[in-house]
Structure formats: C-alpha cells, structure tokens
Amino acid sequence: MNIHEYQAKNMFRDSGVPVLDGVHCKDVNGALSAYQKLGRGTVAVKSQIHAGGRGKGTLLCPDTGDVQMEGGVKIAFSEHEVEEYARNILGNVLVTKQTGPEGKMVRNLYVEAGCSIAHEYYLAMLVDRSANSLLVMASEQGGVDIEDVAENDPDAIHRIWSEGRNGFTHLQCSELGSALGLVGESCNSFSDLVVNLGGLFIDSDCSMIEINPLVRTVSGGMIALDAKVSFDDNALFRHPEWENVRDLSEEEEIEVRAKETGLSYVKLDGDIGCMVNGAGLAMATMDVIKLYGGEPANFLDVGGGANEDQVTTAFSIILEDPNVKGILVNIFGGIMRCDIIANGIIAAVGKLGLSDPLVVRLAGTNVDEGKAILKNSGLNIHPADSLAEGAEKIVNLIQGGV
Amino acid sequence: MSIWVGEDAKVLIQGVTGRQGTFHGSKMVEYGTDIVGGVTPGKGGMTVSLHDRMVPVYNSMEEAVGETMAEVSVIYVPPPYAGAAIKEAASAFQSVRGGGLVVCITEGIPILDMVDVVNAMASYPDVRLIGPNCPGIITPGSNGGSKIGIMPGHIHRKGRIGIVSKSGTLTYEAVAQTTGIGEGQSTCIGIGGDPVQGTGFIDCLEAFESDPQTEAIVLIGEIGGSAEEEAAEWISANGTKPVVGFVAGSTAPPGKRMGHAGAIISGGKGTAAEKISAFRSAGIHVADDPSVIGQVLADALIEAGLRDS
C-alpha cells in the first residue's frame, strides 16, 4: 500500500527525519492560505499522486486532453504564481513515465517552504531478500533516475545492511555518510536521519522508503525533500491507522474490490477471462492460452481458501470486462477444494446469467465431488481434464469452432 | 531414500484445532501421514478427530515434541502468530531432540516478521524451515507415505523424480504430469513464493543431488527475483542428474511497477526470458509450455539412458 508524499512527511516529522514545513490542501483557496501560513516566501507547489516522475510530468485537461502545464511540481515566487500553478494542477490529469499514458487525476496538493540546496543525494531503504535484513542504498547523485545511476555508474551506489530486524547503528550510518563525502555537522545530521528512518521503517512495517532527493542545505543540514513510503500489506492487521491514510481514489477500483474479497486481479487486453488458484498456475494458464492462439483478458488468482461468495465475486469481476467472450476456470485443488469451486460456479452462473462459453478444468482435492456437482447442475459447462485441453477448448469455442 | 522426510515421519500440526488445521490434518492422516499430535496454546489435553484417528493436543511445542518425539511440524497458524509459531517449533526441535523440520503453510506473514524468523533460525542449526506461504513437502511411500502440507495426495506416486517449485498449484501440475508418464516422485517440495523464506532452490538441489532414490529433477520457477538464475548457476557447476525446468510468466505483461530500489536489487534480473536463457545455458531441459513438463521429462530420461521410451 502506498501513501502520498505529504502523509509520508508527517510520519518523517514525527520520527525525527527532517523535512521542510508544508501544508496539504485540496483547492486553490487552500493553496493561497498555505502560502500565507508559510510566510509568503519561495514555495514548492507539488501535485500529490501515487506515482513518481511528477516534476517531469505533464498536466492535461481531463475533458479535452489539452496540455495544461508542463511539470507537476513547480517553484512559486509569488502569490500569483501559487494561484496559477494550483489551478493548473488540481482537477487535471498528471501523466508521468510511471503512470502510463492515462495518467492520474490530481486531487491533492502540497505547498512546501523552500530551502537553499547545496547538493542533492539519493537514499532508499528496503528489505534485502537475499541478506534477510534491511538495506540502505545511497548515492551522491540525487534527483535523477536511480536506474540510470545503477546502469552507468554502479560504484556510485553505497550500501549498508542492518543486523536482521534491528535498525542501523550511528557508526554504520556515519560511515555511509563519509562514503557520500559528507563531513562534520552534515555527516552527523545524515547519520541521525538514517537511524531514525530505520526506526520508522520497522515500527510502521514499511516495505520501502525512497527519498529522492535528500538534500544538504547551504547551512549544512540534511533534509528529505521528497518522500515515498510503501507499507507491507501483510502487516495491515497490526496497523489499523493505515485506513486513515489510504487513498482509494489512487487505486484501481476493480482491483480494490478484488483485494477486499481476497482475490488478486490484474486486467489485461485479451478476450478470455481466467479464474485460477495460485499465482504460478494463473501465470502458466495465461502462457498456455496464448500458446493456443488466444489472449487472456485478465490474471485472477482466487487464492488459498476461497468460498462461494469469492467465486461469485470473481465471476462478476471477470464479466464486468466487456471484452470477455469466454471464461476458462483452472483449479488444481490443494488448500482449495474443488466442490467449493463447483458450488461457487453454479451460484455465480445462477446469479449473473452467464451467456459466454465456460470451460472448467478441476483437479486435486475433492475433484470427484466437484465434477459431479457441475455435471448434475444441468448447466452448459465444458469440462476439461488438463490445462492444455482447457485452453484449446476455450480458444476454439470463442473462435466459433467445436 | 528421499529427502528430509521419510515415509514414516512422525508429524505434529501447529494450529490443529483451526479450520484449516483440522481439514488438512484429516487429509494428511487419510494419505498415510503419521500425525502424532497437535499444538494449540490453551487447548492442551483435548483430542482432535482427524479422519480415522484421535490426536492429542498439547499447549506447547516443547511438550508435544517431548511426549511424541516427532521430527516434523506443519504450521496452519494465522499470520499474526505464525512467526512466533515457527520460532517455537525450531527451539523445541533443537532443544528436545537436536533437530527437526518445520513446514509453514501460512500465507500473509509480514515480511519483517520473516526477517526476524530467518535470522533466529541461525540459533537452531539442525532445524530446517520450509516456507512460509507454500504447499509443503511430500514423500510418497510404497503404501501411503508422508504428506506434510496442503497438496492433493492422490496425484503422487513413489518414484525417482525430485520436484521443487516456488508455486503451489503449479507443483501439482508437474506432479500429475510425471505420474502421467508413468514416473513417480522421490520427494516434492514447494518452497513458497515469499521474498524472505527458509529453504531455497539450491538447498533442495543439493539434497536431490545426493539422494540415491532421486534420478532426475523438475525445477519450477516464476518471474521475479533471481533464485532461478542462482539455481541454474549451481546446476551448471555441480549438477550430474538431468533437470527439467519451467518458468511461469512468459506472457505476463510487465507487472505492477516495482519501486526503483527494488528493480536495482534484482540487478535487472527477473523476466521469464532471462531465467529460461539461464536454464538453457546450464543444460536444463526447458519446457516452454507447462502442459509438456511430463513429455520433456520423458525425453530427458531417455536421453540420459534412464528410460527406453
């Protein structure tokens, strides 16, 4: 789960990670009073969306598609500029290289005080799966794409690892600071910042924190000028407060609904809807559909212990896609019981009135019960015994064959 | 022989009184697994009915291992408590009987909990962890066998093929196909798809390599991470038995955007094409289509002189 920059910065502030003063607002008047509150100096007017590359993005009018403004993050030197930038940002669609061509509607704005920058750095904290520890990656080259640095100048990226789940020590953070060329007060400030960030990462069950840029000011302090925080979804049970920072308008509505029901759904461009248990088998099912000349309309993993309601929801999500001309269900039951899937299919078809061809391949736990339930239902369901047979059948059926 | 789990292994179930624990416990007993007890804190002294067997419930793993001398524990505990359950099992096996195997089926454990668990495992050097978020491990026997996890038992048959996979249901697909060509399995392991986990591909490959019952290996990976590439390197340097490989996700479009730093740590590795090419360079027989894993295996066995047709 991702949060906005202004929300991440509130967490930074509370955890002793230095940030500039700023005000979150949702309309132009709010932006103007934020400007007053921040002392009418130079400010940054920043679009808030869950995607990077905002500064180099383009704002488009949602109705006409006309370019409204280049750049989703602007430096304003006057009240007039604050008003102009806020007007061009709010309610318009920001397209960045991370949003895809459809872009994202900007509904939130952050007006932030300015500072005098001496140098920009990059810093990220994440879990290193191979070392079973937290990892900090930092570079003297901030404000640019870290992929480019990794590709062109890999030695410019410095790393430190934590001892397991414990955070980072001041000693290792100071050494990292020195590796970045920081000295004296700047190095101390950097070390405090990384230690505190480690505490935040662990206490808040983050999966990643990225600060790009992290800046050294002319007076020598270190400040997080940007903030990107992602939480580990698996830890939601111990963080009820995440509900307060969740912005559902930033997430795909259909994927949110799928997730709420315990399903994992990703929409694709083809016409064969798929319902599969297990991510690996779901990917393999897509692979085989394509191999037989079809195109999958989606990835849908019904997960471990689905019930009838989940199967019904899965069907209704698949059928909401107007491109779908047929459905392939592929279940190899382990934790998933085939009889539950079979009852779910019958309930879903009864409720939704399915007219498209449906091929069902069941195998594994309680397979005989499942097959019998489908057979005795009287519904027009095409059974298949193997994945290949199922894929071939559904491809032929929607192409008017068999 | 087989790896890590014998046909007659004595097994405990943590979370035995829960819905999943009881359902899969019954399926395990039905298959022939020797379930000797279960653990649910606060429910010690109860018994649970699993298929045709009444199984005692203990309050703690230490008590359960002490009473039953079980060598394996399988965990169906919900995510908030699963990390603690793994550590409790590892500690009990190490202190009471000097080793054991912990299989964690639970899906959805927070990643920092797993960082903690995997680091704690260093204190229990004779205990192996498989999972979490995995289907488990099975060693089919001549009559029954030991099924430890959630896989459907009836598709397995005792034999000479070792199977290891990240994905649960795709493992079953491979198993069904090896059985379909008249082969059987020595041991099948689902290592799970979580980023921080216990046993990895290479642990399994090493064990299969030195297991006399295993004559060929099926290795099933999926996109993301670099475990498949590392496994291919290991096989290239150490492997002597034929290996059949499949990587799921060839047709998956570039997925949900990973964060910048995540993309770096995998060093640009992670696509199916890269993994398949690493497999081929290591001499692995690659199945391009998951439906032909069985056929590719048959061909590989013929090529190695292990099968006539």
Image (tube, coloured by chain):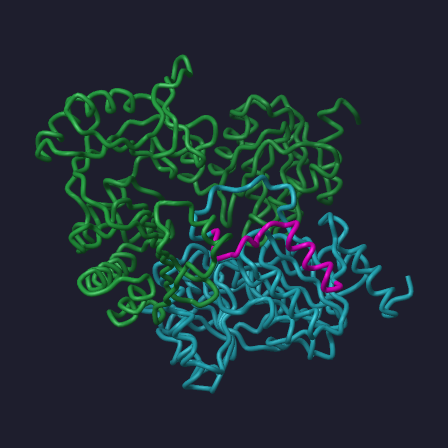
Q: Which chain is green?
A: A
Dividing the picture into quarters, in which one does residue B79 lie?
A: bottom left
Whether residue B144 appears in this view of the structure is no
Instruction: Please name the residue shown 74% across and 42% down the image.
Output: A388
The x and y percentages for residue B97 are 47, 86
A173 in relation to A8, above or below: below
Q: Colour of chain B?
A: cyan
Magenta-colored segment: predominant secondary structure: helix
Instruction: Please name the residue shown 43% across and 62% down the image.
Output: A128
Q: Nearer the viewer, residue B156 or B4?
A: B4
Whether residue B220 appears in this view of the structure is yes
Horizontal arrangement in the rendering, residue B216 relative to residue B61 (left or right): right
Horizontal arrangement in the rendering, residue A25 relative to residue B96 (left or right): left
Q: Locate the N terminus of chain A and report the quarter of the image it occupies.
A: top left
Q: Nearer the viewer, residue A236 or A80?
A: A80
Dividing the picture into quarters, in which one does residue A318 lie?
A: top right
Magenta-colored span? B263-283
Q: Locate the C terminus of chain A and report the quarter of the image it occupies.
A: top right
The x and y percentages for residue A83 are 19, 21
The x and y percentages for residue A391 are 71, 37
